[in-house]
Amino acid sequence: MHASETLWQSPPEHPILESNEVHVWSASLDLPVSRIQALEQTLAADERMRAKQFHFSKDRTHFIVARGVLRAILVHYLASDPRTLQFRYSQHGKPSLVGESGSDALFFNITHSLWIALYAITRGRDIGIDLEYIDTSVAWEEIAERFFSPYEASMLRAVPTQMQRGAFFSCWTRKEAYLKARGTGLSLALSQFDVSVAPGVLAAILSTREEDQDISCWLLHDLSPDCGYVAALAVERHPCRLKYWQWPRGIGYTDSLSNPPEDHL
């Protein structure tokens, strides 16, 4: 399923996340200074420290907005103050919520590129999402030959020339979404598994060279967040129903942090 086949909708006041659903949120990272400052107030000390480590102000701002919006989205489901959320991180840096466990626990993943951030939220299943801006300056042919599997590289070469760049980015996001869902980072080489490559072919994990890894329990979805971008979602234990929400620029928990959270749901 492609996000372009449905409309990114304004979220309801109280979004309900069923056990068989994945909610995908899109948000702009280009916000007024006042809203950026308000979002920064909701971050934990370690997040503010990470923000300060970015050399370029644009990267620092985008990190603040991406993490601040993540907190604002999560509290839609948890009915709490965004400042009270605590994250823990896996060995390879995948974040999860402290205090969330069991089959009803919130699982999430986040990605951002250039001016857009995407968030995937579900319950009780691993999930990963990746977004890429189709950058014409990227040496995609060299990257594909170096990091893709031999099968994927050959499939990419078979794609019509004018479609190869787009096919490369689609393949890349599918692979990254799967790695992020698994929480392995690049400890699992991109060449260790194959995904579909050809335009028009359904996103799928086709094979793996890992021992004792069942790829049949994973589902890939292509997403179309905006012109010039490609994205993919990897979800454990399908089937699932996807809903697409557009994060509103004009409202949110940061409008008045002194008010109780329920006033802004």
Image: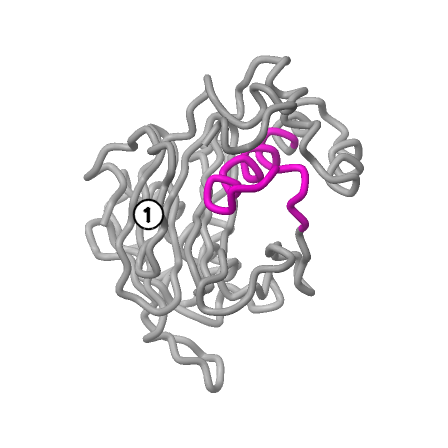
Residue 229 at what x, y percent from top left?
Answer: 39, 35
Residue 27 on image: x %, y %:
45, 30
**In the depicted view, which residue is nearer to us: 39 or 100?**
100
| Residue nearest the viewer, comparing 2 with 166 | 2
- Left/right of residue 134 with respect to residue 18 in the rendered view: right
Q: Quadrant of the C terminus?
A: top left
State the residue in front, 46 or 114.
Answer: 46
Residue located at (36% from left, 68% from top)? 218
Could you tell me which residue is drawn at 29 percent across and 31 percent down? 9
Residue 256, position in %: x, y?
A: 59, 20
Q: Is residue 78 above or below residue 220?
A: above
Residue at 55% from the left image edge and 66% from the top image edge = 101
Q: Which residue is mark 1?
A: 167
Main SS of residues in magenta: helix
- Disc 1 crowd, CA 10 A, few/some/many (<14, 14-19, 20+): many
- Residue extending farthest to the bottom is 212
> Is residue 119 highlighted in magenta?
no
**Residue at 47% across, 21% down:** 251
Q: Where's residue 153, x and y in %?
A: 39, 60
Whether residue 151 sits left or right of residue 177 in the image: it is: left
Q: Is residue 130 above or below residue 196?
A: above
Badge 1 amino acid: Ala
Image quadrant of residue 155? bottom left
Q: Please state if 15 lies on the left or on the right of 137 as rendered.
A: left
* Callout 1: SS: helix
Can residue 156 be seen here? The reply is no
Q: As drawn, is 100 to the left or to the right of 208? A: right
User: Is residue 245 in view from this perspective?
Assistant: yes
* Magenta region: 64-86
